[in-house]
Amino acid sequence: MKKPKLPPKLAKPLKRAVDLPVWADLGLRLGGAFALVMLVVLLHWIDRDGLKDTHDGTVSFLDVFYFTMISITTTGFGDIAPVSDKSRLIEAVIVTPIRLAVIFIFVGTAYNYFIKHSWESWRMKRIQERLSDHVVVLGFGVSGSQAVQELIARGTDPACIVVVDPSAGRLRHAEQQGCNVLEGDATRDETLAAVRIDAARTILVSAGRDDTSILIVLTARHLAPGVPITVVVRADDNELLARQAGADNVINPVRFTGLLLAGSAEGQHIAEYMSDLASVDGRVQLVERPVHPEEVGKSLDQLATGKGVRIYRGEQCIGFWEPGAKALEPGDVIVEIAVTP
C-alpha cells in the first residue's frame, strides 16, 4: 500500500490560534517582569550596606528602588553605586542576568503585540489577495479533517486549502498540516468573504449539524454562485433541502455506510474494493476529468489512462455499456478507475 505524502511543515495561516487570551498572555509577561524587578529590589535592600549614595550618604528604601530601576534600564547616573566586593558580585552574577531577562521580556512583548501583529495583519492581507483556485473547507470535524488529509494525500498543496471553523483547537490541527486557517462563523457573509470564497475552486461543507450545514450552503451559494459546493448531511429528508440551498453534491455518510454494509453481505471483498476506490492510499482510485482532445471520437473503453466507467455529457449520465459511450465528445466529463501512481 502506498504511503501518504507528508504535508510541508510550514503553514500560511490567515489567523493563528493562540493558547491564551491576549490579556492573559500580556498579564503573565508583565507580571514576570515585575516579579524580577522586585527580586532585584529585595537583593539590593538586603545588601544596601554595599551601596554608596553620593548625594546624602544614606541609602533608603526609595534609594534602593531608584537604583534598581536605573540599573535594570541600564541608565546608570552614577549617584548610587555598588562599592563592596559582595555588591559588585551580586550585580555581575545575579542582577545582570535578571536585567537581560527583563529587557527580553519587554522586547518580546513589544514584538508580539506591535511588530508581529502588524506583520501578521499585513501577511494575512497579502494571502487573502492572492487566494485563487483554492479549496475552502467549512467545518473541520471528523469529515472535514478526513477530507483535508485525503486532499493532501492526493497531491493538493496545503497552502491552497483554507479551513474555516469556530474552534481554535480544531484549527491548530489544520494549521499543523500546513493549511490556511480562519477562526469564525461560516454562516456569516464577512467570514466567507474574508477567504475569497467567490474565487475558490470548490467548497466542502461539513459543519456537524444538518441545519448549520444547509445555512452555510445558502450563504456560500449567495456569495459564490459559480463555485461547486459539496455538503455532508446525515438525515435523508435534508438531502433535498441541501440541493435546494445550492449544493451541487450531497453526501450522506449514513446512507453510504448502509450501502457498504449491504454490499459486504453479497461478498467479503466489495466493501474493501469500494474503500480502495475512494482513497488515494489504495491500489486504484476513481478519477473525474474532462475528456482530452486526442480522445474525442474514441469509445470509453479505449482510454489509455484507466478504465472508463461513466460519462457526464451536459445533464446526461452515460454508463460504459450504453450507446453514447461509443464516441466521446468535446466537453464530456469522464469518470474512470485509474491505477494509483
Image (cartoon, rainbow, N blue to C red):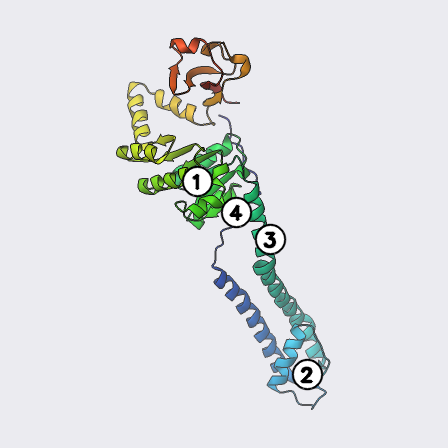
Question: How far apart are the alpha carbons under marks 1 and 3?
Answer: 29 Å
Query: Which residue is rendered at x = 41% and y = 20% of the image?
Result: 314
Kind of residue at disc 3 = Trp
- Circle 2 or circle 1, nearest the eye: 1
Q: Is residue 146 above or below residue 94?
A: above
The disc, 2 or 4, on the residue closer to the chain's N-terminal end is 4
- On the image, numbered disc 4 is attached to which residue? 14
Question: How far apart are the alpha carbons under marks 2 and 4?
Answer: 55 Å
Query: Which residue is rendered at x = 47% and y = 12% of the image?
Result: 328
- On the image, numbered disc 1 is attached to which residue? 223
- Circle 1 or circle 3, nearest the eye: 1
Kind of residue at disc 4 = Leu
* Image quadrant in which you'd find residue 35: bottom right
Which sits in the foreground, 286 or 9? Answer: 286
Query: Which residue is rendered at x = 31% and y = 25% of the image?
Result: 259
Looking at the image, how many numbered discs can be counted on the residues?
Answer: 4
Element type at marker 3? helix
Disc assigned to residue 119 = 3
- Circle 2 or circle 3, nearest the eye: 3
- On the image, numbered disc 2 is attached to which residue? 50
Kind of residue at disc 1 = Leu
Kind of residue at disc 2 = Gly
Residue 248: x, y in percent?
39, 30
